[in-house]
Amino acid sequence: MVLGGATIALLFIICYFVWSTGSDQNLDLDFSTEYFPKRTIVTATRDFTVPPEVIWKALTNLSNYKLWYPWVRRLRVTNENADRWVRKHSLLEYKIEVGNWFKIQPFLGAPYTNCRFIGLEAPSKMVLEMRFFPFNREVVTFNLTPYKNCVEVNYTATSNSFHNFLTATMFSWRGKEVLRNLGEVLPKIELEADGGVATTASTKFIFDDNFINALIAKALDDGADILNSITEKPVRGKAKSGLIKAKRSGVSPDTTPEALEAVNQFLSGGVAPPISSAPPSVSAKEPDEETLINTFVANALGGDEDPITNIEDRILRSKVKSAVMKAKRSGVVPEIPESPPEPATPSDSSPKQDLKTPPKSADNPEEAIAQAVQAALGGNMDLINSIEDRMLRGKAKSALAKAKRAKG
């Protein structure tokens, strides 16, 4: 019975392999598979009208592997030298060097497997050790050979494991899809009129509502990790905030195929203009302090705590951290209004203490201590903690203690 079951399974695998390798044949790709008793070699070659530097950028962008590399559903990294927990698994902090490890999940429910870089020669050769199956090790090599008007990319996957005859059938046959998918995520290229070296097209991205909605829809399908590779902080912040709202409501934002195509090109390494070229509606009004704090808290609960550490205002930074701790304890994500209210102007009739600016102790120390003590009695210790003069800060804390005793 066991032998019969094994025979049926083997026949099923052979039929599946024949069907998969025989379907979707294209003449623009050279693909071959060689089987040996203890080794399987898969080779694919394709020409790209793209400079090698552009292809190399796509190969070294780990956040986009799930967009084009078959059997890479999720990818994780660990930064051993990171001093903060939020940067421990950040792709922005990860350095692509020989010997560095990363983990991949081939499909939903599969365990994460260890992979690493074992050879890097920019921009011509990359060698990876990939494990699409826990007991199978494949050495994957990308070779880039530039010519006058194209770049030949050669993909080779070699498996020397004991189970290579099975894993090659299950995994390696998809090697023909690697270069096809890679070509789809590369940015648009325009050749020079004389047929010389190709140059990248000057793609312009407008970070309007359609682009942000398409970015949110992309993150809902492929995971929030794709947003971590965006270097433009306003775009990344708006996308993460919108992603949190979309997950809470369970409704994906409306988008267009053109916007999705622009997002794919942007994520694959397209050149973006300065943020100032975005429509004025993106940053028309400066949000007030409460909206600003709620935005930081929502992003932190979504996994992006890096902007908090970059807040230069100590008072505001401490308020944000306190609000994050309260939100984590209560489990309530603060609401962010679509159109933030106008900030207070100097002509307001009711003057308010500027909580973002520490009291100027050099001008009037007694007044600074009085302001800090009054704020502390109301439950706000930020003003006292922001006093840089240690002696003055000690006097303020002593005055606070006396005020509490007199009040009690």
Image (spheres, rainbow, N blue to C red):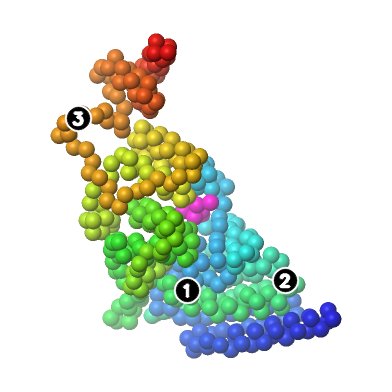
Q: Quadrant of residue 243?
A: bottom left
The tag on residue 182 is 1
- Amino acid type, label 3: Ser
Reply above or below: 268 against 329.
below
Of residues 15 and 310, the one nearer the viewer is: 15
- Between disc 2 and disc 1, whose residue precedes? 2
Q: Are marks 1 and 3 in contact (CB under 8 Å)?
A: no
Of residues 179 and 223, the one nearer the viewer is: 223
- Amino acid type, label 1: Leu
Q: Position of residue 32 (x, y in %)?
A: 60, 84
Q: Main secondary structure of the magenta part?
A: loop
**Element under disc 2:** loop
Magenta segment, which residues?
A: 89-95
Of residues 260 and 329, the one nearer the viewer is: 329
Which quadrant: the N terminus? bottom right
Q: Position of residue 94 (x, y in %)?
A: 51, 53
Magenta-span inclusion, residue 86: no
Q: Position of residue 186 (x, y in %)?
A: 41, 72
Residue holding disc 3: 350
**Element under disc 1:** helix
Mark 1 Cα within 10 Å, few/some/many (few <14, many 20+)?
A: some
Any part of residue 115 in sight: no
Q: Are marks 2 and 1 in contact (CB under 8 Å)?
A: no
- Between disc 3 and disc 2, whose residue precedes? 2
Residue holding disc 2: 161
- Amino acid type, label 2: Ser
**Element under disc 3:** loop
Q: Residue at x 29, y 69 (%)?
A: 202
- Between disc 1 and disc 3, whose residue precedes? 1
